[in-house]
Image (tube, rainbow, N blue to C red):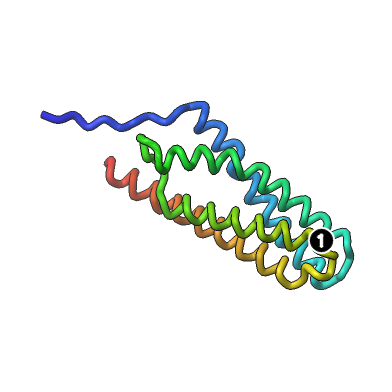
Amino acid sequence: MTSRTTPHRSLLATTIFDLLDPVPYGAFVMALIFDATYASTAEILWVKAAAWLITIGLFFAVVPRLINLVQTWGPSRHAGKPAFWLNLLAIVAAIVNAFVHSRDAYAAVPQNVWLSAITVGLLFAAAIAKTVHTSRKEASHV
């Protein structure tokens, strides 16, 4: 007779992940809005604010992604791999976007808008992939 045990997540890691994971979403969505506003108004405040939001989003994206790395590829393997890869691609797009924002203000347009949209789209796809993985996992335990 074999017993099926489910590995347990670290409560501290799960708490930190749940606390910090939404921050980059908000920062990157606001950066997209600010980039689009700058593209239509040419008011330099918007592109500078978007650059700061991208930096803040990247800063807060590091710790949850490291926790997600351990959860995805570690011994317990709780998280889904598609969500991990989509989040990683979103971070890469945001890093490239940060470099685009380091240009002179109007030299960033239209790449800043496209890269912000790609980042937000990848984060949205990662959230869907995570939800699908969670719902399938819960359905298999019933």
**Numbered circles on residues, count:** 1
Q: Quadrant for residue 112, please give it.
A: bottom right
Which one is nearer the viewer's eye here, 127 or 86?
86
Q: For this rendering, which residue is in front, 86 or 130?
A: 86
Residue plotted at (54% across, 43% down): 65
Q: Is residue 73 left or right of residue 117?
A: left
The residue shown at (72%, 59%) is: 99
The percent position of residue 119, horizontal first and vertical second, equals: 61, 60
- How many neighbours does mark 1 have within 10 angstroms: few (below 14), some (14-19), or many (20 or more)? many
For the C terminus, the image quarter is top left
Q: Is disc 1 placed on a helix, strand or loop?
A: helix
Residue 17, how many percent across, how many down? 55, 37
Quadrant (top left, top right, bottom left, bottom right) of the N terminus: top left
Identity of the residue furthest to the left in this view: 1
From the viewer's perspective, tell me whether residue 134 is left or right of residue 101: left
Q: Residue at 38% across / 49% down in the picture?
A: 135
- Residue 86 lies, with reference to residue 59, above or below; the image says below
- The kind of residue on which mark 1 rests is Val
Residue 26: % across, % down: 67, 50
The image shows residue 60, relative to residue 86, as above or below, that is above
Where in the figure is residue 116, as x and y percent of width and height? 67, 62
Q: Which residue is mark 1?
A: 47
In the rendered view, would you say 92 is above or below 43? above
The structure residue drawn at horizontal position 84% and vertical position 65%, both measured from the top left corner, is: 105
